[in-house]
Amino acid sequence: MNYLDNKPYLIDAIAGNSNFLASLGRTGRLYRLWWPHIDYPQHVDAIRSGIAIEGAAPGTSWFDGEEGGWNHESGYLPRTNMYRVKAVHPQLPVTAETVDYAVPGEDIFVRHYKFANRGTEPVTFQFVYYSSFRSMETHFYHTTTFDEAQDALVHFRHEYVFAVSSSNVCTQYQAGGNAWNGAAATQLSGNDIDMQPDGALSWRIESLAPGASVEIPVYIAAGSTRQQAASALSKAKAQPVSYWFDYTAAYWQRFVDAAKPAPAGSPAVQELYERSLLTMKLMSDEKSGIVVAAPEFDEQFSRCGGYSYCWGRDAAFITTAFDRVGLESLSTKFYEWTLTAQDPDGSWQQRHYHDGRLAPSWGLQIDEGASILWGMWQHYSHTRDESFLLRVWPAVEKGAGFLVSYLDEETGLPLPSRDLWEERLAEHTYSAAAVYGGLQAAASFAALVHRGELADAWASAAARIRSAIQERCWNESRGAFYRGLKLAVPEQAYREAMAQGLSGTIETNAKGYATYFLDADPIIDISLLGLSVPFAAVAVEDPRMAATADAIERELTSPLVGGIKRYEDDPYIGGNPWILTTLWLCHYRISQGRYDDAQRLLQWAVDHRTAAGLLPEQIDKTTGETAWVVPLTWSHAMFVLAVSMLAERGQPAGL
C-alpha cells in the first residue's frame, strides 16, 4: 500500500514540538510527520487506526477515515497544540478518542487512544494500528522489524529510525508481508522482519464493561540510530501516559502565559491570537531556528512550488510579530540562522532549507535579503541586545553592500529580480521599498558600530531609491503606484504591446538571447502597501499612498465573499482572496486611523479561520471555504501584528 502520491492538499490541524511536526485531518488521521526538522525530511506514507468488534462485521473498521460511517468531533485542547478527535459510529458500541501531541524536548510523539463502551453489554474488540514509514519520501531501501524486547515495530532507513509501541503489550504483530491486508482482515501473521516500509500491531480488549473505558497510548519514538530510538521509547514507557499528557499541556499553557496576553477584544479575536502564537511556535524549528512558511502539502509540486521552506521575507514579518508579543528568543534564533544562509556576495536567495542550503528556486528575489536586514533592525530596536548587534554586523555589512551593488543607475531602483509572488521579472516597486528599508536598517546598524562612512553611504542610497519611487513609479492614469518598471514579458506580448502604442526595450545577453521589457507594469497589487507598511519609503499620509490603498480596496475586493486578492486577474489557485493580503490592508487602515475599516478587515480574517482555529492562505472566492495551505505562518503573523497595532492605538480588536 502506498499513499505517498495520494495525500490531501488541505489538512485540518498540526501538532508537534518544533522537532516533530505532524499534519492531521479532522478525522484524526495522521498524514505527514517531519523529524528532526520541521521542513525536511517527511517520513510517513500512511498511518491508520481501527477496531474490529467481536460479533460485528468481520475485518477492521478504520475510525480515522472518512469511510466506514464514523462521525467525528475534533479540535485543539484549549491553549495547547494537542489535537483531540472523538469518533462515534451509529452502529457500533465502542467510541474512539485520540489525542495527538509531541512531548516538548523529547523525540516522542504520542497518539493517546481511549476507547469507551457506550453499549449495554460487555464488548470484546481488537485495536489495530497500521504504520508505513517511507522515510525521506522515497520508495526504496526501507526495513521494518518487530523487536520483541521492546514489543515494538521498528521502521528504519538511513539515519532515521522510528520505534512504534505502547505501554500496553500488543497481542499480534506483522512486519511487511502484505501488512495492510493483514491489518484490514485483523489477522496479523507474526512476520518479524521485511525490507518493506510497513507493519501493524493489534491489542485485544476482553469484555469491556458498559460505561467502561480503556486507554492505549501509541508512542512513535525517533532516533538517528536504533539505540537512540529504543532509548526514547523506553523513556516514553517509563511514565504513565497521563504524565506525558499533563506535562505537555502544562508546557503549552506556560508558553501562552509567557507571551503578552491577548489585547482587549472579542473572545474570537483573543482565541485566534493565542492559536496564532501556538501555531507560529510549531512553525519555528527547534534546532536551526528557521521559520517555515507552511507544512508541506504538495510534495509532487503538482499545483505549486512547495511551501515547507524558509523565506526571508515571510520570516521578517513573522519575527516582528514574535517580538511584539514577547517571544524574542525565537526571533534571535532565526536571525542567527540567517548567518548560515547568506551567500559569499552578501545576498540571501529566494528560500532555504533548515541547514541554510538553497531550496528549489526561481532566481533572486532582492526583497528577501533586504527584508532580513530590515527585520534584524526591528529585532535589535526591540531588544537592544548589544551582543546580537555584534553577531549580525558582518552579515549586515555584506548584505548592504550587495544591495547597493544591485541598483540600476538608470532608474535608481533595484535591478530586475523576481517579485515577492515569484511570478515575474521586473524592477518591482515593492522590492524597491524593501531595499529602501534594508538599507535604512543597515545605516542604523553602521552608526552604532561607528562606521559613519558606511552609514552615510547606505542612507544616501536609500534616499535615492525613495526619490526614484516618488519620481518614476506613480501612475497618474490609474491613481496608484506602478507595480514596477522594466517588466519582462514574452516576445509575443511585447509585440502586441508595441502595436498598442506602449513603450519598452529589448536587451540581449552575451549569448545572444533577448529579453523583452515593457517600461511599466500598471497592475494594482496589494504589495504596493509595502511602500508604507512596513518599509516607510512613502509616508502613510501621502495622498498618492492613500489613493493607492483606495485603488487596492476598490479593484481587489473579492465581490462574492469579500477579502482582498493579491492583484488584478490573479490566476493562482483561481484568484482567491488571501488572509494576509486582507490583513495587510487592515494594517494600512490602522496606520491611517481608519479603525472601523480596519476592524471589518480584521473580522473577515477571524470569520474565515478553519474549524480548528487556523488561518489558511486563501479563501475560495465563490464558497468562502478554505481554499489553499493550512496553516500559513505569514497569515498568523499578520493577524498578531494587526491586533498589536490596534492595541498600541488604544483600540479593541474585533467586532
Image (cartoon, rainbow, N blue to C red):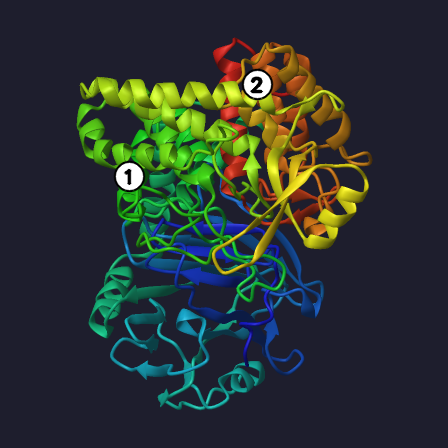
Q: Nearer the viewer, residue 289 or 513?
A: 513
Of residues 161 and 84, the one nearer the viewer is: 161
Give the Cα separation between the discs numbered 1 and 2: 36 Å
In the displayed structure, does residue 157 sit left or right of residue 578? left
| Residue 333: numbered disc | 1
Vertical order, 640 against 240 (above or below): above
Can you say whether 623 is above or below 428 in the image? Answer: below
Q: Nearer the viewer, residue 249 or 642?
A: 642
Location of residue 447 with respect to 224 vertically, above or below: above
At label 2, counting other C-alpha atoms closer than 10 Å, the crowd grade (few under 14, some 14-19, many 20 or more) is some
Which mark is in front, 1 or 2?
A: 2
Residue type, mark 2 in image: Gln
- Which x, y percent locates residue 403? 38, 34
At mark 1, the secondary structure is helix
Left or right: 515 as drawn, with respect to 235: right
The percent position of residue 498, horizontal first and vertical second, equals 76, 43
N-term mark: 1 or 2: 1
Quadrant placement of the N terminus: bottom right
Answer whether residue 215 is visible to the viewer in this image: no
Left or right: 357 in relation to 70: left
> Looking at this view, is 445 or 263 the one in front?
445
Q: Dot 2 lies on which element? A: helix
Percent coordinates x, y for residue 416 in the rendering = 52, 41
Identify the residue at image location x=46%, y=74%: 131
| Tag 1: amino acid | Lys
Query: Whole-percent x and y of residue 597?
Result: 68, 17
Residue 49 in view here: yes
What residue do we see at 54% from left, 74% from top? 124
Residue pictured at 64% horizontal, 83% vertical: 58
Please give the label number shown on residue 470: 2
Could you tell me if the residues under marks 1 and 2 are in contact, i.e. CB atoms within 8 Å? no
